[in-house]
Image (tube, grey):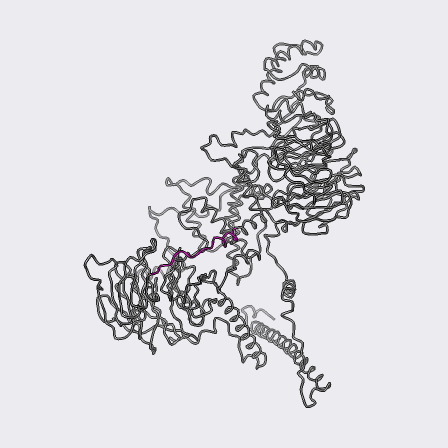
Amino acid sequence: MASPGEAVVGDTHVGEKKKPTSRYWEEPQEDGKNENKVVKDGEQTEQSLEKKTRQTQKAKKRKQEEDQGDGNKFISGKSDPFPGPAPIPEDRLQKFKRRDKTKKPRRQHYKLKDMITRSEEASEMAQKQAARFDLLLPEDAGFLEGDEDEDTCTISQEDIADVVDITSATKYFDLKLSQFGPYRVDYSKTGRQLLLGGRRGHVACIDWQSKQLMCEINVMESVNDVKWLHSEAMYAVAQKKWLHIYDSNGIELHCIRKFNDVLRMQFLPYHFLLATASATSFLQYLDVSVGKEVAAICTKTGRLDVMCQNPHNAVIHLGHSNGTVTLWSPNQKEALVKMLCHQGGVRSVTVDKTGTYMVTSGMDKKLKVYDIRAFKPLKSYFLPAGASCLSLSQRGLLSAATGDIVQVYRDVWNTPVSKPYMAHRVQRTIWGMNFCPFEDVLGVGHGEGFTSMLIPGAGEPNFDGLDANPYRSAKQRQEWEVKALLEKIQPELISLDPTELGQVDRATFEQRHQDRVKALGFDPLAKEKFIPKYKKKGRSSTGSVERRKRQVAHEDQRDVIRKTAEDKMKIEKERKKREKKEAVLSSQRSALDRFKK
Amino acid sequence: TSHNQLHPLPLPDRYPLTPDPQPALRVGKMDVCQHFLETEDQEPPGPDKHVTLFRLEVCVDQLALPRSSTDHWSCVNVCPFLFFYQMKVKVLSRNPDDYVRETKLDIQRVPRNYDPALHPFEVSREYTRALNATKLERVFAKPFLASLDGHRDGVNCMAKHTRNLSTLLSGSCDGEVKLWNLTKHECVRTLQAHEGFVRGMVVRYCGASFFTVGDDKTIKQWKMEAPGYGEEEEPLNTILGKTVFTGLDHHQKDAVFATCGQQVDIWDEQRSSPIRSFTWGVDSFSSVRFNPVETELLASCASDRSIVLYDMRESAPLKKVIMTMRSNTLCWNPMEAYYFTCSNEDYNLYTYDMRYLDRPVTVHMDHVSAVLDVDYSPTGKEFVSASFDKTIRIFPKDSGHSREVYHTKRMQHVICIKWSSDNKYILSGSDEMNIRLWKANAAEKLGVLAPRERQAANYNQKLKEKFQHHPQIRRIAHHRHLPKNIYHQTKELRVMKEARRRKERNVRKHSKPGSVPVVSEKEKHVVTVVK
């Protein structure tokens, strides 16, 4: 029972509560401690964002936050100057972003909403962890910087080779192979092995870093192109008539007679597909894991000697003599896209690693850059000699062969480039050119043999050991091979957008209905056609049958009319209700009414 | 060396002297220049080129830098006053020691880079992995582990040991009770408990004794361990009832148990007469179960198609729901104990919320004959049901259809079912005198998993979940082989249901609007709720 004295106190201090006296065991309250914290450098960190969102939430959560704030304190009473996890820069987070947040469904789909929230939380966590891990990557990319007002393109290969360390200096070398004519070049996926194919039949594979020759053969036929298959154990050689496959000892494994007159080849490593373009205008796909021809497409565009792949979506790009570039997948007999890129014929095509940009060069001596996602031209350059051969490095350096000079350009898509980044002259006309993956090296095959050039900043510095490991052991390679074969992507999944498979198929009702009709063979929602029963005693005369039909039709019509009438009534009712409510509200006397005149 | 043989360079018109970007070397070279300018040659070295060249050469040689004499000629020719170019270059050069293991005893180094650009076709590769995982799951789906034979009549009831995972008790239709060691798949003890059927069996919460009821109108309490050598197999306690008992259950932590038969009785273990009896105008009950959380609550299935809820502390039943068909048994969800699931004669199972009995939370359909028994997994996420159609089905607690069906050629009508307390096994007792041991997850690997194995299993599970709605994966994951008769009966039931729905639709179409209301599947099976 409350004493009377207390009651009096309660009456006198209406609305005001006496503050409880502070006790030594209670911690002093610090209001707005968290709010007053200065955000460093004006940069909005993750944490501050998080805090803001939390503040808007319910009081319950706020209380929890305060509890957490107390948790940041040390026993000595000092507060942590850097509470919470370290902030991650926004641009680094952006690098690992996979997709935008999905719109959450309305309230009634609470289970779905919950599921989406949880999966988004998980992906956000993965994104943050990957961004944090990015700090720990061991290697930095190479670079080359000249003096002020000095062009880097004037720096010769010898100079670079002189100043860099011995291991790198050995990566600049020249192979004099003048006998068997211009060479095609291909590096294996890990960048350790080099495959050379001379026009006049010389095929050699080399461990180019240790300069060890793995095998050397002469196929006694003209060689159009060479390509490594999924590992360094096998390679394909497009010879005069057929396509041959050899192993790394130079033993002929297969002669594939289904593939004739092949001029260019591309290997799709994740699909285990060897795509070949032939002089008979056939684009053929060979599944090298089972040795089966997946697709043979007659492009009907003449001799196909310009070919490249989009590493992002495994679409094959073909360049034609009429100036068009066509995009192909094995699932379609027609080209996915046809682009008119040049006035004359197309001489070379290449696509960058992220599948964003395509660079083409043509007989009109132009070099053009396209945004391949939007199919829009970005930049157009004029090269006086015209580029016969193009290649893009992992970090986006473009090498163009003009006659016997190799020119390397940097960042051709963002800023208009006027001078090459590097240049080098080889002895005779360049025939094939490729950047070595994970190394700052450009391999150039030409009439006098092969030149390996140092291009600082070309290669990706940090490789992923589970994808392509240049330092892998034999055992690791075997394991990788099994894993890679297990997750071989089926050729049916090749499409322009490789992420399509992970997106929600928002087929419209109509589409779904059409599919259903196709699957069932009839339309389940279609109205049955009314067929009047035959009646005896002359009651199935034409007139009466017609009348019965009309009756049924009227019945249906009546249904429709009834429904619309009901809807109308409903709307009318609601309107009346609303009006009534408003009228009631407006009829109420307000305190301010007395001032109205 | 090879590059010395090269032809003259094409492009550079002046020849730069290039210091190395590595700081030590650069300092060394700078020192050369500084030293040269300050000490050796006080006046600018313009007129006397040869001296300059000579001295520079000397300095450079002292540093043992790889330079040929022509370089310095050109250098000095370009600029009489020592001209200095600053070129910074770095070329990727990895130390292999950082990327390969040191000794054979180490594990291989696998440097990672999670940049999405280095991992193309992420989605397609994940999809392929998920497809492989789904296929492998079907390959490894071998749920049947063992059959425990030894009973001489159909197995009528089973009981899990409350304290011991490897012990199972089973009672058969000839009054015999057997104790089984599940790890060894053998019977450890047999006792003739009753004359006629053993109707119900339950292990006391302490695990030291168990109770059986039989058709001979008795309740018997037995010790868990076998009698010593020469001792006779005798019950600890025998209660003679007035009527036949059809089921019993023990309280979670008190010395109280409940039986059902003509009425639901609550017994104190110390007394020979029930401390409470509940009747609600019904003649017989088939099953009674204590709530595992609200331990004073009970539920029972009655033969008048009703499920009755009781509070042990009150003298009258709480409420009951009457359904269209009779329920055989029920089981409380051990985690969310306001839910219980009952197995019904109309081939369905119904999950009810104890608080809202007017409509079930979920109707679980798939069986093609009466469902005889049901048991929840200890996690409360799934339950298993036994049916007269000779199959066992596993349902997720909130799904209308089963995720798994088990059957064998020899298994007859399954009468009783239990989900083991470690959530790994399912035990079924059937008409043809056998108890069968199944895996709860058909494709799960038994035994201790290595960490990598477990990681791979978890990863595969996640992948399967992620891509479960893709048609190709769904088809493989959902496909189950069924015995011919069940397959055809399922089809037949579907046709019947469709016909009924069509008829109802037609009736509604041709009656006065509103006179034939739409009754949902959940409401269809509840007749009324009585309080």
Number of marks present in the image shown: 0
**Measured along the vertical axis of the image, is residue A251 above or below residue A54?**
above
Q: Quadrant of residue A344?
A: top right
Figure quadrant of the C terminus of chain A: bottom right
Question: Residue A555: x percent and y percent?
Answer: 65, 80
Q: Can residue B314 be spotted in the picture?
A: yes
- Is A574 or B163 nearer to us in this picture? B163
Q: Quadrant of residue B338?
A: bottom left
Q: Image quadrant of residue A44?
A: top right
- Whether B240 is among the magenta residues is no
Q: Is residue B479 left or right of residue B256?
A: right
Q: Position of residue A294 (x, y in %)?
A: 66, 49
Q: Left or right: where does residue A127 sit relative to residue B303?
A: right
Of residues B279 and B149, which is closer to you in this image?
B149
Q: Compared to B106, does A70 lie above or below?
A: below
Compared to residue B316, the image places residue A533 above or below, namely below
Query: At which x and y percent is residue A366?
Result: 77, 38
Bounds of the magenta span? B133-149
- Res A42 seen here: no
Q: What residue sits 24% from the left and 60% below the top?
A: B223
Instruction: Tell me the residue at 53%/73% (across/down).
Output: B496
Is residue B138 part of the magenta span, yes or no? yes
Residue at the far bottom in the pictured view: A537
Where's residue A234, x and y in %? Answer: 62, 37
Q: Quadrant of the N terminus of chain A?
A: bottom left
